[in-house]
Amino acid sequence: MQSVYLPEDQLHDEAALIEVARRGDLSAFNALVLRYQNIVYTVAYRIMGDQQSASDATQEAFISAFRRLSTFRGGSFRSWLLRITANACYDELRRLKRRPATSLEELPSAESDDGPSLPDDTDTPEEVIEQSELRNAIQQCIQALGEDQRTVMVLSDVDGLSYQEIADVTGANLGTIKSRLSRARAAVRDCLQAVQELLPSAYRLMDNE
C-alpha cells in the first residue's frame, strides 16, 4: 500500500499515526516504532537477559503489533504494545528453554531513554566500575526470577507502570500483580546481599536482620 503523506503536526499526534497505520501505512507505523523502540527493547532486554534474544523479541513484537493493529480498541497504546512485547518475550523464552544460560551482555546503552544513565562527571574510575558491577548484579538477580515475577518487576520498577497498567499488560488481576511484585522485590533484595559492598548503605542488611 502506498504511504500516506502526513503533515508535520500529525507526525507528533499518536492517535493520527495509529489511525493511518491501521490502514496499512508503513511510514506511520515506522514513526510509532521510533517513538517506542527504546522502551520496547529495554523491557525485552530486562526480561530476556541478553541482547540478541531481546533484539529478536523486539523485532517480533513490532511485527506482531503491525499485524494486530486492527485489534487495538483505544486506550493506552503503550500498554497494548508492552503486552505484545511481554508475549513475544514469553515465546522467545520458550524457544530458548532448553538452551544453556549464557553470561550477561552489557546493559542497554545510555542512548536508550530507559537505559542506565551516564556516569556523573565527578565519578571516579572506581565508582564507575562499581556502578557497572551493580547494574550487572541487579540484572542477574532479576534474571533469576520466574517469568511472571520478572515481567511484573520490570514493568513496575524499570518502566514505572502503575498496578493497573501492569494488569492491562499481563492480563492478571491487581491482587496477583501486587503479590508477584512484592515477592520479586524481596527475592532481588535477598539476592543482592551477595554484593552488599556495592549497595548504598540504606539497602544493606545488618548481621542481626
Image: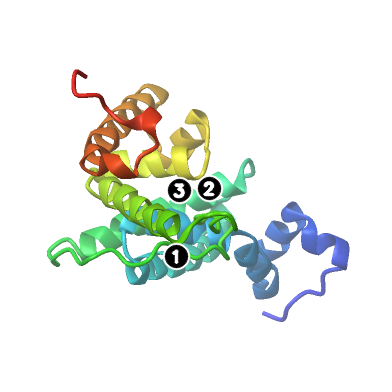
- In this picture, is 177 found above or below 62? above
Identified by mark 3, the residue type is: Arg
Residues 88 and 52: in front is: 52
| Residue at (47% x, 61% y) in the render | 41
Residue 7 left/right relative to 182: right
Which of the numbered marks, if any, corresponds to residue 80?
Answer: 2
* Residue where numbered disc 3 is placed: 83
> How many numbered marks have been drawn onto this rendered protein structure?
3
Query: Of label 2 and label 1, which has the lower sequence position?
Result: 1
Where residue 97 sits, quadrant-wise, is bottom left
Residues 129 and 70: in front is: 129
CB contact under 8 Å: marks 3 and 2: yes
Residue 10 left/right relative to 99: right
Measured in 3D between alpha carbons, the distance from the residue under mark 3 to the one under mark 1, in whole angstroms, is 12 Å
* Residue where numbered disc 1 is placed: 58
- In this picture, is 142 found above or below 96? above
CB contact under 8 Å: marks 2 and 1: no
- In this picture, is 56 found above or below 117? below
Quarter containing the C terminus: top left
Identified by mark 2, the residue type is: Trp
| Residue at (39% x, 28% y) in the render | 202
Query: Of label 3 and label 1, which has the lower sequence position?
Result: 1
Where residue 20 sits, quadrant-wise, is bottom right
SS for tag 1? helix
Identified by mark 1, the residue type is: Thr
Quarter containing the N terminus: bottom right
Measured in 3D between alpha carbons, the distance from the residue under mark 3 to the one under mark 2, in whole angstroms, is 5 Å
The image shows residue 143 at horizontal and vertical percentages of 27, 50
SS for tag 2? helix
The image shows residue 49 at horizontal and vertical percentages of 31, 59
| Residue at (58% x, 65% y) in the render | 111
